[in-house]
Structure formats: structure tokens, C-alpha cells
Image: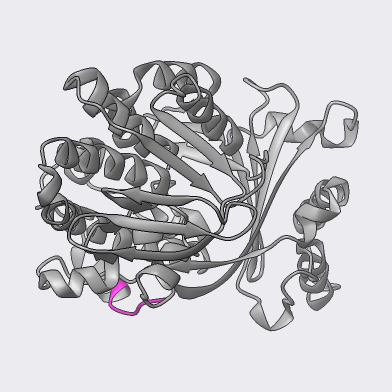
């Protein structure tokens, strides 16, 4: 949402000298520093440079370059805070409001009208377009557009971070490279090392397919790790015991809120790129002057950290089309946006689903083949990439077979 607001300002005000008023409606009361990591891929960098080059420069300084991909590993909250600070520079154009709960949305061929619950019940917002950038469990998707909710992947996620400065027993994490992947049966614990840019900061992410053992809001990742260790009691080698002891120490230092706040990972099943416009509307999400973008439209599995960059590409493409559209052609512009974005996002979504499932199979991350150089180049091209991608793998047959069974 922040990136889209900045993109609209850039296209309308900076480049075309047109007037535009943008209101960001945030349901939460404040902007919390939650989350773990954010992957800013080369395609996301290209998109952001078109929107706000100063933010890209800032993020490149505080992020950790991943040589093999050309992307940056960043703390999630740092990306959000950089975009928020940039948006707050332009209060005459971008109005940011928190604690906003939508009561009703109506629209006709001329405008969208939004009303709100208390304490903003006296506000009636009339706009040319409503953009749902409210994440995978999008209110706009289900309650405004009436679309089906995202599909569960059978994976639960916990995220958090620890400061290891006063924890000598955890200093080893600052020497383990960018990330450290540890599998405990159906539960995966991954550490992300930000020490080189943010001293002593380690982010952690736990994902688990042990759904029968999970009660949302109660089960902690430590419970799942301990459960697995009990199943192999007597068979665990020293390396596995060391991994468990490290996980127990990290998770033992985590806040109770982070330990009990889990989310069921879900994805949006996209139609084939050749589908009719109405089929795309029913899956991606467009109706009249209302459109979904980012995870609300096409939540991906997080195999390669491409979800955020896809959202930045959305922001660029949508703002380009809207700035060139007369007021009475907004609905057509939104349909064109969806038509242009669907083939690329569909291809990447299928690939990320397959790569994520491979991480849970024997061999984990090492079992996933590399992309072909041509496909990697296509990924990196950003919003102007062709919608006819080259093969992703040298053995496309193996991928097609695996991808045919949706997780």
C-alpha cells in the first residue's frame, strides 16, 4: 500500500504534473515492528527505483547483498519504515490514517464510496479507485469483492527476532553466514543473520506442516521442535542435538507474543493466463473501480523471497496505467493491469509453490535445482519483462510433473 501510494504520487504529481489525492487506510492502530525478513530481488529494486530511488539507495546500504541472486536480505520492519518515512514527506498528497475499519463499500460507473465503523463513522470517502493492498487475508478480497478466501498450504508460520549482544551462547549465530536452515521433521527453523549491518540482530522463522499438533494461538514452535526430538529420542546424533539446543535457546529468548502468534500460510490460486477476463476477475480480484494488488491478489509461497518484489511491480504497472486513463476509463485500466500482470505472476507463483514443497522433502533446500540463466534474467527484468518466459529448469518435465499436484 505504501509503495502504491508513492508510485501514484510519482506518476501523477512528479512526472505528469497532475493533481491526485491518496488516502492510505490502515486497519491497525499503529505500525508495529513485527516480522522477520524481506527479500528485495533485482526485479523489486527496478520497480522501486521507478517509484522512489532514494528508498532503494537507503535499503541497499542497510541490506545484506546476496551475491548469487543480486538481491538484498533486509529486516521486514526496515523496509516498511523506509517506505512509511518517504510517504510521510508528502502529507499534502498522501493522507495516512490508522485504526480504519471499513463498514461498507458501494460503487457505480463514476466512483467508489466507502463508509467506516467507529470511531470514523462520520467519514464518507468518495474516490475514483479503491486498491486492496491488505495482504493475503484481505478484507477487500472477501468482504468487498465477495471472492473466495486464499487456499491453505497446510503450513503454519511463526516469526521473530532476538538481540544476542548479551547472550554469549547465541553469538555462534552471527558467524553462520546469511541464513541457517534446520529441519526437525515437518518443522523447519531458519535463522537470518543481520549482524554485519544491524549488530547482534538475528531474525528467526519457523514453518511447520505438523498441523495435527498445532492449535493456533496456543502451540509454540518450541513445542513442535521438542515433540520431534522426543520421536527420535535415542537416535539423534550430536549434530541434531546441537541444532535442538540452539533452537531451544533462541526460542526460549523470544517474546511470548511472537511464540504464540502464528499464521496459516495461504496462497491465491491464480487462473491460467489465457483465461477469460471474467475468470481472472474472480481469482485475481477486480470489480468495477476496485482492484487487488500484492498478496491480496496473488500471495506466493516464500521459497525465493519474491512476494514483496511482485507487489512493487504491481505498484509500478498500476500507477502507469491509471495516470494515462481518463476518469471514465478507470475500470478498463484496472482490467488491463490485471491482464498484463497475470501471466508473469502466475508463472512465478507456480514455480515458488514447487520450490517450497521441495524444501520439505528429503534433501531440503539442496534438492532444489537452479534456475536456467535465461529464466533468472527474465525474473530480474522487473515490470517490463515479457509475458512469455523461458524455461525455468533444464529438465522442465520434472518441474511440470511436480507442479501438477498443487500443495
Q: In front: 114, or 211?
A: 114
Quarter in which the C terminus is drawn: bottom left
Q: What colouring style does the render use?
A: one colour
Question: Does 46 lie within the magenta span?
Answer: no
Please state the total of marks drawn on the protein image: 0
Farthest residue to the bottom: give it: 212
Q: In front: 92, or 392?
A: 92
Q: In front: 386, or 271?
A: 271
Q: In front: 263, or 214?
A: 263
Quarter in which the N terminus is drawn: top left
Question: Residue 288: percent from the left, percent from the top?
Answer: 21, 63
290 on left or right of 322: right
Farthest residue to the front: give it: 122
With respect to residue 277, does 388 lie above or below? above
Question: Residue 206: percent from the left, percent from the top?
Answer: 66, 57
Please state the extent of the stretch shown in magenta in the rendering: 403-407
Amino acid at each position: 500500500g505504501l509503495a502504491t501510494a508513492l508510485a501514484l504520487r510519482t506518476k501523477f504529481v512528479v512526472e505528469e504534473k497532475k493533481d491526485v489525492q491518496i488516502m492510505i487506510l490502515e486497519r491497525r492502530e499503529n505500525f508495529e515492528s513485527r516480522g522477520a525478513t524481506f527479500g528485495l530481488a533485482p526485479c523489486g529494486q527496478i520497480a522501486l527505483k521507478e517509484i522512489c530511488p532514494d528508498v532503494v539507495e537507503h535499503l541497499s546500504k542497510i541490506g545484506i547483498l546476496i551475491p548469487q541472486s543480486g538481491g538484498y536480505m533486509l529486516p521486514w520492519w526496515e523496509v516498511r519504515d523506509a517506505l512509511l518515512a518517504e510517504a510521510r514527506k508528502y502529507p499534502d498528497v498522501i493522507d495516512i490514517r490508522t485504526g480504519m475499519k471499513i463498514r461498507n463499500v458501494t460503487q457505480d460507473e463514476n466512483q467508489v464510496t466507502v463508509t467506516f465503523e467507529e470511531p470514523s463513522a462520520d467519514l464518507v470517502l468518495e474516490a475514483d479507485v479503491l486498491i486492496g493492498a491488505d495482504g493475503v487475508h484481505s478484507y477487500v478480497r472477501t468482504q468487498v469483492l465477495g471472492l473466495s478466501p486464499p487456499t491453505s498450504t497446510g503450513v503454519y508460520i511463526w516469526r521473530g527476532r532476538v538481540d544476542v549482544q548479551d547472550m554469549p551462547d547465541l553469538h555462534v549465530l552471527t558467524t553462520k553466514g546469511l541464513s541457517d536452515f534446520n529441519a526437525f521433521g515437518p518443522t523447519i527453523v531458519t535463522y537470518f543473520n543481520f549482524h554485519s549491518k544491524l549488530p547482534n540482530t538475528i531474525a528467526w522463522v519457523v514453518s511447520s506442516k505438523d498441523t495435527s499438533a498445532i492449535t493456533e494461538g496456543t502451540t509454540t514452535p518450541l513445542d513442535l521442535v521438542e515433540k520431534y526430538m522426543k520421536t527420535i529420542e535415542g537416535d539423534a546424533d550430536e549434530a541434531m542435538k546441537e541444532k535442538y539446543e540452539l533452537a531451544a535457546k533462541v526460542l526460549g529468548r523470544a517474546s511470548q507474543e511472537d511464540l504464540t502468534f502464528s499464521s496459516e500460510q495461504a496462497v491465491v490460486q491464480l487462473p491460467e493466463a489465457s483465461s477469460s477476463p471474467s475468470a481472472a476477475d474472480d481469482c485475481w480480484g477486480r470489480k468495477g473501480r476496485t482492484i487487488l494488488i500484492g498478496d491480496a491478489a496473488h500471495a506466493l509461497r516464500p521459497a525465493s523471497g519474491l512476494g514483496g518484489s511482485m507487489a512493487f511491480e504491481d505498484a509500478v504497472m498500476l500507477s502507469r496505467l491509471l495516470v494515462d486513463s481518463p476518469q471514465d476509463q478507470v475500470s478498463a485500466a484496472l482490467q488491463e493491469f490485471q491482464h498484463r500482470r497475470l501471466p508473469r505472476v502466475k508463472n512465478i507463483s507456480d514455480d515458488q509453490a514447487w520450490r517450497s514443497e521441495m524444501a520439505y522433502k528429503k534433501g531440503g533446500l539442496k534438492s532444489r535445482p537452479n534456475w536456467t540463466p535465461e529464466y533468472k534474467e527474465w525474473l530480474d527484468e522487473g515490470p517490463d519483462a515479457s509475458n512469455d518466459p523461458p524455461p525455468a529448469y533444464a529438465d522442465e518435465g520434472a518441474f511440470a510433473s511436480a507442479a501438477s499436484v498443487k500443495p
